[in-house]
Image: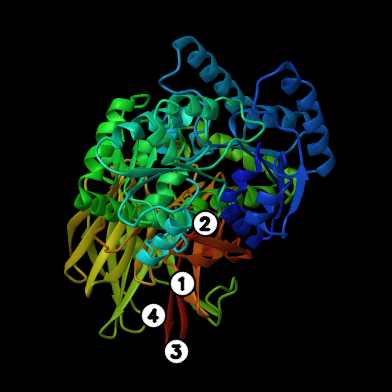
Amino acid sequence: MRICQLTHIETNFKFLAPLFRALAQDGHDVVAASNLDRDGVVLRHHLGDEYDVHMTKVSRNITVRACTVEVVRLARYLARERFDVVHLHGNLAAVQGRLAARLARVPIVINHVHGFYFHDRMRPVPRLILIALERILSRFLTDYTVTVNEEDRQFALRNGFASDPSKIIGTPGVGIDTQIFSPRGRAEGLAVRREWSVPEDDLVVTFVGRLVTEKGLLDLAAAFSGLLVDRPAWLWLVGDVNSSERDQTALRELDDLQRNDDEAARRTIRLGLRHDIPQILAATDILVLPSYREGMPISVLEAMACAVPVITTDVRGCREAVAEGDAGILVPAQDPDSLTEALRKLAADPEERRRLGSAGRTLVEARNTTARSVAPVIALYRRIDASRSDASAGAVKQIRQSGRRVLRTLLPTIIRSALASPPQWRIAVQHVSDPLTSTPDRTQAVFTEEELGDLGLTFVADPFAVHRDGIWNLFFEQVRKGSDRGEIGLATSSDLQTWTYQGTVLAEPFHLSYPHVVEADGETFMIPEACASGSVRLYRAAAFPFKWDLVDVSLEGRPFKDSTLVEHDGSLFLFTETSARHTQDELRLFVAADVRGPWTEHPASPLVVGNADAARPAGRILRVGGQLVRLAQCCALRYGAGVRAHVIEQISPGEYRESRLYRQVLEPSGSGWNARASHHIDVHDTPYGWIRFVDGHS
């Protein structure tokens, strides 16, 4: 896709560079568009020469011209460049950009919210007006909203900023490179201090950001004067003021404030715009950001990554960054006295500074790395790209899919079940030369229709096999005559030809299916689908294969369907379909270090939204030719239309990337036991070739 990353100042590309690289790695053509208020020097420093750079006029002040002439000019530019996606950064840039993108008929508009402009400290009427305006722009001129803190995401969800909640995506900031921003040796810090003639033992307080009033610059200056009463200290101001900045008076006010305090003025050093922030942080004792509003404060996270203790304000974004005070000190905004007191206490307690620095580093490594922050955005782009590919399959197919999707959404499950004829699902064993082939060499039913009748079973489906001590133990969903509730049944065989039904091995008061059996920590576990319970449930084999005990409720609160687990590089990953209205089109991914959890949602999750041919798992994850392969049910045209394979190209606790095999690996045959549907494969590599356990609907 051709993507425009549009913002108002080129310094923003410092934190957009990882996103550019990740999008380029996925094969997209990414363009940087901005006011080149520094002649492109800063932009090129962060992006290099790999990307096209376009100069655009994006205002930072609301004027009649900004909302008319500039919008029209921006629309002409977007139309001329034929972008597939416009990705906006900055509050007024987002207003202008969304209006212009719709005028230019850009297919996809993403608003990346680095902190909503409105905040709790605003006067009520202007705040309500801004919220109403953002709601209109988000619902009608925005396809996806990305927030950099959880408070903004929850606010957008509560206030209906999107008709579809899945189109509001949260990220943990914009990402910190924890290799570049890391604790550095004392020698490196001393070298920076010598550069500015700062004694080794004096306290250094550093501020990094725009030198404007709303960043708390004047509050910090007042607090610094109070700190000097106790000890010798230095205040380093890193940053400057762009010519397009609304606030051009803060530095003059700072001069006026310090005119009555010669010592504070002498010990305040303006370092300007710097590209050696890690080195400056190595010489810093305390970083302070007394901002009035934030999205997710980059300077705070960078300091935390360098194990530098931080003091910041108790506002949205800042409090999330320091985990509500666990990894930093929070003070009220616009309160110089509280800031002075916090500075004095932290300056007098080296041990507390070390504790906060260590806690900050640990928190950033766990939550705010570049990989974790970029992954949800890249997952969004892959979702967009996949939807575009599916759209190109043909208008007729699209209409049919849309119609069926609407019916699935509008008709409650209970009505669909009542109208549907009783399903005749069967399971079979296939011998194949290729685990991903659609043409098996030989297929043999596990139970004939007559045998199922004798056993009192209406149907069997979702087979999972375990080969142990020369015996094939085949677990499957079963439904008994006169019942509509699934249970887990078992059949055994020594030769894959003659099967002995062993009865029910797991039943609950609610429906069970998809008995995914896994080995972990030297034990055998089962994760059956328990969608009706609204949970993912973990059972342990107390006496394999007949007795299973519930040991954990792993996840709760969603209709989790066909949960599938895989271990890779020491981490466990759980794929599960979660569409609330059972449209089979939402795939989420969770990660844990242990099968018993705790499970946390992967930063790239949801992996799939709105694609019923790629979301619902169709069997265990395969390892074929050194690659992991994810199987997904095809449900867009109808439930059970087959199985497709997706090659997992990268999977880690912070990243996920996959590509799809366009041919189906399982599909209905048109006659016999699997004439109408097939939706499950369980593959095994045996000494006598590949074996697949599959199901089908006659």
Residue 513 seen = no
Mark closer to the observer (4, 1): 1
Q: Which residue is mark 3?
A: 688
User: What type is the residue that disc 4 sits on?
Assistant: Gln
Q: Pointer 2: residues within 10 angstroms few (<14), some, or many (20+)? A: few
User: What type is the residue that disc 2 sits on?
Assistant: Asp
Any mark on residue 622, and which? Answer: 1
Spatial distance from mark 2 to mark 1, Cα to Cα? 46 Å
Where residue 59 appears, as percent x and y from the top left, is 69, 28
Mark found first going from the N terminus, 3 or 4: 4
- SS for tag 2? loop
Residue 155 vertical position relative to residue 627 in the rendered view, above or below: above
User: Looking at the image, which residue is at 45% across and 23% down?
Assistant: 119
Mark found first going from the N terminus, 4 or 1: 4
Any mark on residue 497, and which? Answer: 4
Q: Pointer 4: residues within 10 angstroms few (<14), some, or many (20+)? A: few
